Image (cartoon, rainbow, N blue to C red):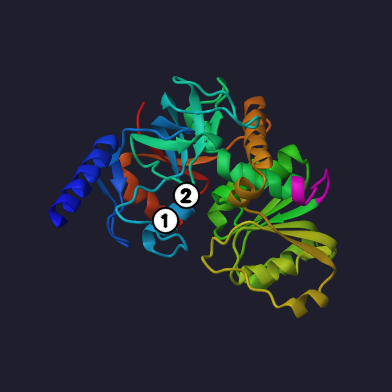
């Protein structure tokens, strides 16, 4: 009886394995946290689920979140081996898209697409599998490199500034970490779409010119948390700014709060310092009345997919019209992936860092 049971079990397992087919794709693979990624042939499924597409990757952006995962500092602890990378552009080579949701586009094989693949990841590879609700058609006027540089950071900035802060023409806004990927997107959106007056605060003096070129009327190095507030109050005649867009956190966050004027708004959009922003509730009472707003594009994907998708379509359209332009700091090859990840700990670049996977 035991023999029959084992035989049936083996038959079922063998049948299941036959139904799950695999193929291999060249990829940069994280095998051990805190160790360099390894370039090798990586096994991915050859059978798409309903609602999935297969993408031949052209470029993948390298983001702070990728570096944090690989270094073990992220809350996300992926099952190893693991292929990072979520901000992807490429060509659809296979599709089981249902197009059941009105918010989703009618994407077909052969289309050029931008993908924000935060749930599945896998972008540091020649091929990856994606979910249809994270796929967006790229306007013919935009190059792959431009499109991959605009999706995540610009959509986050757009929601934070236009939707949540209601930033208006001639409002004054302070952007911290203004030379980073998210910070430059916020400067671009604020200055060139909202027509606001932008103060850009940078960690390094060498990056201040990039921020001014993007549209800030003033940009300076943060020499200390205390100096940040003094400089902003000086530039605003002691009134403070209408909006703070903070992507630093850590010890800069309390000083950024001291920069906001009465009935202003503070957008918390990231923590480049790798230290979560801290705030004692009683401190709210000693400052001018202001609104504290957290913005996460991934949360919009979960709770309001319509706004998530529309914000990404909007930034692609604005880029097509020339209203906004992403800053590409450096483009590296897939076999230089570890060099790309090191940029986030060495301050070697500002703006977006890209991996070019294929022509």
Across and down, in percent, residue 209 comes to 60, 48
Q: Residue furthest left?
A: 3
Q: Main secondary structure of the magenta part?
A: loop
Hey, which quadrant is residue 314 in on the image?
Answer: top right
Secondary structure at badge 1 equals helix
Residue drawn at x 48%, y 42% is 117
Q: Which residues are magenta?
A: 163-171
Quadrant for the N terminus in the image: bottom left
Whether pointer 2 and pointer 1 mark residues with C-beta atoms closer than 8 Å, the reply is yes
Q: CA distance from mark 2 to mark 1?
A: 7 Å
Foreground residue among 222 and 244: 244
In this picture, residue 41 sits left or right of residue 180: left
Across and down, in percent, residue 100 comes to 59, 29
Quadrant for the C terminus in the image: top left
- Compared to 301, does 21 lie above or below? above
- Compared to 38, does 321 lie above or below? above
Q: Residue furthest front?
A: 1
Residue drawn at x 63%, y 73% is 278
Secondary structure at badge 2 equals loop
Across and down, in percent, residue 245 comes to 69, 56
The residue carrying pointer 1 sits among few (fewer than 14), some (14 to 19) or many (20 or more) residues within 10 Å by Cα, namely many
Question: Residue under circle 2?
Answer: 63
Any magenta on residue 214? no
- Compared to 142, does 129 lie above or below? below
In this picture, residue 319 sits left or right of residue 86: right
Question: Residue under circle 1?
Answer: 67
């Amino acid at each position: 009886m035991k023999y029959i049971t084992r035989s049936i079990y083996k038959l079922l397992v063998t049948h299941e394995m036959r139904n799950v087919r695999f193929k291999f794709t060249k990829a940069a693979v994280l095998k051990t946290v805190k160790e360099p990624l390894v370039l090798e042939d990586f096994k991915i499924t050859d059978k798409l689920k309903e609602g999935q597409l297969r993408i031949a990757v052209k470029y993948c952006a390298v983001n702070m979140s990728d570096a944090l995962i690989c270094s073990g500092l992220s809350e996300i602890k992926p099952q190893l081996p693991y292929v990072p990378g979520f901000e992807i552009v490429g060509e659809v080579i296979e599709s089981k898209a249902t197009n059941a949701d009105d918010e989703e586009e009618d994407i077909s094989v052969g289309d050029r697409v931008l993908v924000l693949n935060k749930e599945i990841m896998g972008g540091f590879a020649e091929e990856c599998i994606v979910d249809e609700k994270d796929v967006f058609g790229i306007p013919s006027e935009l190059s792959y490199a431009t499109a991959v540089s605009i999706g995540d950071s610009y959509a986050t900035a757009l929601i934070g500034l236009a939707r949540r802060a209601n930033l208006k023409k001639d409002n004054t806004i302070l952007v911290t970490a203004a030379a980073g990927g998210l910070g430059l997107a916020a400067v671009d959106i604020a200055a060139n779409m909202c027509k606001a007056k932008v103060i850009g605060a940078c960690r390094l003096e060498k990056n201040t010119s990039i921020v001014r070129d993007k549209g800030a009327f003033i940009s300076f190095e943060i020499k200390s948390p205390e100096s940040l507030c003094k400089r902003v109050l000086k530039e605003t005649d002691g009134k403070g700014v209408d909006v703070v867009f903070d992507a630093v956190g850590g010890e800069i966050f309390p000083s950024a709060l001291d920069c906001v004027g009465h009935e202003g708004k503070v957008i918390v959009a990231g923590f480049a310092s790798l230290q979560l922003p801290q705030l004692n509730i009683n401190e709210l009472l000693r400052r001018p009345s202001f609104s504290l707003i957290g913005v996460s594009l991934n949360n919009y994907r979960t709770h309001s997919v319509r706004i998530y998708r529309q914000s990404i379509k909007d930034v692609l359209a604005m880029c097509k019209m020339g209203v906004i332009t992403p800053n590409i700091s450096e483009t590296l090859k897939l076999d230089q992936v570890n060099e790309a990840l090191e940029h986030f700990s060495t301050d070697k670049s500002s703006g977006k860092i890209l991996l070019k996977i294929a022509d």
